[in-house]
Amino acid sequence: MSDETFHYLAYGSNLHPLRLCDRVGPVECLGSVCLPGWRLCFDKRGSDGSAKANLRAAPDSNHQAWAAVFRLERRQYARLDRYEGCGRGYETFWLDLTLDGRETPVLTYLTPSHWQSAQAKPYRWYRDLVLAGARFHQFPSAVIEALNRIDTMADPDPERADRQRLLLERITAHS
C-alpha cells in the first residue's frame, strides 16, 4: 500500500464492487475476511428513517462477521465519507487485520451508540444490496441465509427504490 492508497473494510451496502465503484470510481477488491469477535447488525439509524448495517464488537463471544477489503485511492476517501454520512451516523475507524500474513490497517465506518436504534428496519433494497455483496464474495451459506432472514420494510420513496432496483438488476446481470 502506498501513501496514495488505503484499505477499506466494507460490510454493508458497499460489499459489492459495482455498488462501491458507482460511488467512488474504480477500486481493487482484495478479497473477503472473517472478523471473529464482531457481529453484523442492522441498527444504524439512517437519515431516511431506515436501518443501515453496522459492525459491533462482540469480544469473548463466538460471533463472527464477514466483510470485504478493497484498495482505494486517497482521492476517493472524501467521496466515500460523503456517501457514508461521516459524522452523521458513521465515524471512521482504523482496525488492524491480518491480510496475506501481515498486519494491515484498514479503514471502516462504525456507528456510535447514540446513532443506534433497535426499532428501525432496513429497506428491502438495502438488505438486498448487502445480500448481493455477500453472494459475490461467496460468504458462507449460513451468513447468506441469516441475511435473507433480516426483517425489512418497503421504501416509501418510489424514485429511490426504483434507482436501487436498477442497481440491483445491474449487479445481478454481472454476477
Image: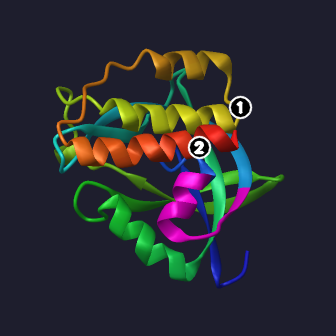
Q: Is residue 110 visible?
A: yes
- The residue under label 1 is 138
- Quarter of the figure with residue 123: top left
At mark 2, the secondary structure is: helix
Q: Badge 1 local density, few (<14 within 10 Å), some, or many (20+)?
A: few
| Amino acid under disc 1 | Gln
Name the side, left or right, on which 32 lies relative to 151.
right
The reply to whether residue 58 is visible in this rendering is: no
Q: Closest to the observer: 25 or 113?
A: 25
Relative vertical location of residue 78 with respect to residue 89 in this rendering, above or below: below
Residue type indicated by callout 2: Ile
Q: Residue at x 39, y 20 (%)?
A: 150
Q: Is residue 138 above or below residue 108?
A: above
Q: Nearer the viewer, residue 104 or 3?
A: 3
All told, the count of numbered labels is 2
Residue 33 vs 29, above or below: the answer is above
Residue on which disc 2 sits: 171
